[in-house]
Amino acid sequence: MSAESLETTLREAFPDATELAVVDRTGGGDHFQVILATPRFDGVPLVEQHRAVNDALADYFSDGTIHELRIRTKGTR
C-alpha cells in the first residue's frame, strides 16, 4: 500500500481538509502516520476525530493492509 493511496482515500472522506499528509513510517507499506486538519473537527473531541479517520480507512484495516496507524488531527480554529 502506498501513502498516496491512503491520502487519496482521506481526501475523498475529508474534502475540506486544510492540511493532509500521509507518511509511510517504515517503508514497508503497512505502518503509516496521518496528519489531518479540517474544519469538520472544530469543537470535536480528539477521540471522535481519530475515530472518523479510522472509519475512513476501515477497509484497509479489515483486509490487513494497515498494520499500524499514528494519527494527529485538529480543527482549523
Image (cartoon, grey):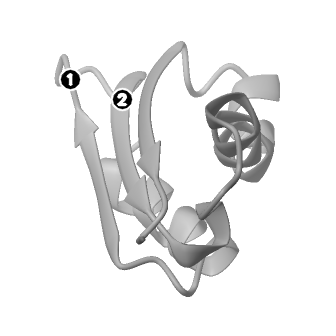
Residue highlighted by disc 1: 25
Residue at position x 65%, y 71% in the image? 40
Q: Is residue 49 above or below residue 17?
A: above
- x then y, percent, for residue 64: 68, 19
For the residues bearing labels 1 and 2, Cβ distance under 8 angstroms: yes
Q: Residue furthest bottom?
A: 16
Percent position (x, y) of residue 53?
A: 65, 46
> Which residue is more in the foreground, 21 or 26?
21
Relative vertical location of residue 64 with respect to residue 29 in this rendering, above or below:
above
How far apart, in angstroms, are the residues tagged by discs 1 and 2?
5 Å
Q: From the viewer's side, name the closer residue of 39 and 24.
A: 39
- Disc 2 is placed on an element classified as strand
The residue at 68%/71% (across/down) is 13
Residue under the image location 55 percent in, 64 percent down: 10
Image side of residue 67 versus residue 21, left or right = right
Secondary element under disc 1, as helix, strand or loop, is loop
Q: Amino acid at mark 2?
A: Phe
Whole-percent x and y of residue 24?
Answer: 24, 33
Q: Which residue is mark 2?
A: 32
Sequence-earlier tag: 1 or 2: 1
Amino acid type indicated by mark 1: Arg
For the C terminus, the quadrant is: bottom left
Identify the image quadrant of residue 4.
Answer: bottom left
